[in-house]
Amino acid sequence: MTAKDLREKFLTFFARLGHKVIPSTSLVPKEEVELAGTRPVLFTTAGMHPLIPYLLGKKHPLGERLASVQKSLRTDDIDEVGDAWHNTFFEMLGNWSLGSYWKEEAITWSFEFLTKELQIKKDRLWVTIFEGDKDAPPDEESQEIWQKLGIPKDRIVPLTKKDNWWGPVGETGPCGPDTEMFVEMVDKPHGPSCRPGDNCGRFAEVWNDVFMEYGKLEDGSFVPLKQKNVDTGMGLERTLAVLQKKDNVFETDVFWPLIKILQDKILKKYPYGKEAKIDRSFRIMADHIRAAVFVIGDGVEPSNKDRGYILRRLLRRAILQKILWGEKEAPTSLLAPVVVETFKDQYPELMANQKRIQKVIEDEEKKTEKAIHAGVKEFREIIGHKRASFQPLSGQQVFDLYQSYGLPIELTKELAKELGRAIDERNALKLLAKHKELSRIGAQEKFSGGLADKSKKTIKGHTATHLLHQALHEVLGSHVYQTGSNITAERIRFDFSHEGKLTGEQIRKIEKIVNQRIGENLPVKSEVLPLGKARQIGAVGLFGEKYGEKVSVYFIGDYSKEFCGGPHVHSTGELGKFKILKEESAGSGLRRIYAQVG
């Protein structure tokens, strides 16, 4: 069964059951969706996203039963792309009840479509349900329905809210328990305790039925909804892999044309299951360029903020894979026409925008390679300083090249190898892991809080970066966000997003603002807040990073509010005088300031 067959079969099945077929909307959410009571998101993340106003009670012009194939994009798991199942861009098959039917119908129809229309054997199906917690009881109704359909109790797995509760999209909104459907991959080795949700390779998740019966309020409580809704989502790529008897999504007909062009022109071979790094690079390039084509097709251009930043990140990650493993002269833009050709019938906007898509990718590739060349230049300078001793690059130096120039550790390792040198890869990877963990828990700085040590001078420098960050916003604009920092007793290094060199007048204004705030002797205080409250009051966090339910926010008077793990001085008067020493490029779209306090 091809992707076209699956799309048509799904929509035809639900049309027979009284559902009106609605077209896919743009990856860029419409304003009315963003204003529907949920926190705005950058991209359409699921089939239900365009339907939020109707799930909240607004009457849909086509009625109470709907179905669609919706293009979607999520980057929460971008680091997982390269395994068998994860994608950034994907197609979501979905059917909805806006107060029309409930669990009995939804589950029965899902079961019927899987076993009769797709002819997946019943004994290969496993399901999960919500086990219940303080907010809502166990979903015993779904369990009873599945058992009635012939799924034995030992293949119905109760899981926590983390696995079997959907929503809300933002901090508040409609949500509820779900039941997920898995197909057992019978030829995959596994241990006796491997269960759905374990990510052990034994099961492929294909469908999710969400029962929106609760609304989450700002205080974190859950209340019953007046209108109970059903929201389902079937991942086209994963379902195709099951139907086409593949153990990964990249060998299905929606990806294989991309793998073929990589095989022929850029990466030369597809050593499936033999060389993990090469195998992974095929998948990352195919996924990221495919996603980029769709994002550009919906009007987004690369930039250093919001959607443009996500697009730039996708393109750069793909281009880096080509630089690491591919043919130097073969551009990644070769993939763009293949994506358009593969999806032109389903998404004609790609063909209409093909010239612009091609140019955007070509231009970004040139900029990215230029940025990498700047990192390579810095790398060679470091090597030159160590020429006499032939010492390996330290983990800190390798990590700094990654953080400041985007040079991945693998590329630095390859460059060092070419020059007969080595790197401290183990400690570099430790610093990278620490950096990711700090970002996850809401720390503002990139490694060890950005501080070389915890001396009084570095702590003063740390506090000064908050003032500097806010001053950059005032002088340059709201597009500025911090991309890295490193603070020693001797100086502050602060990296930020901005196109173009700062003028002397801009530098003087920034210095003046920071010194004014120091002279005001503003108090520096911290407070642990719920994530939603922190965002509501305008606290600044690392763009694109994940945060827990609660975050530490540092307040500098009424002037600055930032997610940060500390430490800081007690008041800005302790900082003394702030002086910018140097301003320079840190790569494409990135600038760097060196400064001092005291």
Image: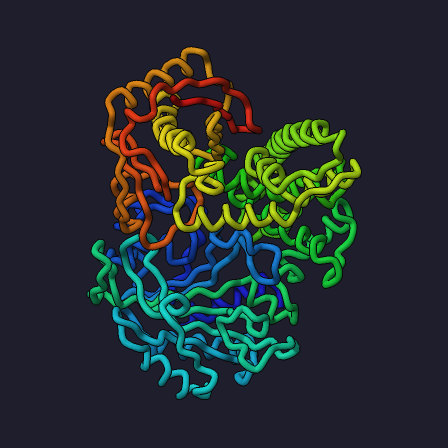
Q: Residue at x 64, y 59 (%)?
A: 250
Q: Between 432 and 395, which is closer to the camera in this rendering?
A: 395
User: Is 110 drawn above or below residue 174 in the view shown?
Assistant: below
Q: Residue at x 64, y 31 (%)?
A: 375
Query: What residue occupies the far top of the structure in this picture?
Result: 505
Could you tell whether 371 is left or right of 489 in the image? right
User: Is 591 drawn above or below residue 179 in the view shown?
Assistant: above
Residue 309: give x, y in percent of width and height.
Answer: 48, 38
Q: Between 215 and 582, which is closer to the camera in this rendering?
A: 582
Could you tell whether 441 is left or right of 333 in the image? left
Residue 235: give x, y in percent of width and height.
Answer: 51, 63
Q: Between 166 and 388, which is closer to the camera in this rendering?
A: 388
Residue 415 is drawn in which quadrant? top right
Residue 258: give x, y in percent of width and height.
Answer: 67, 51
Residue 511: give x, y in percent of width and height.
Answer: 37, 17
Quarter containing the N terminus: bottom right
Could you tell whether 275 is left or right of 312 in the image? right
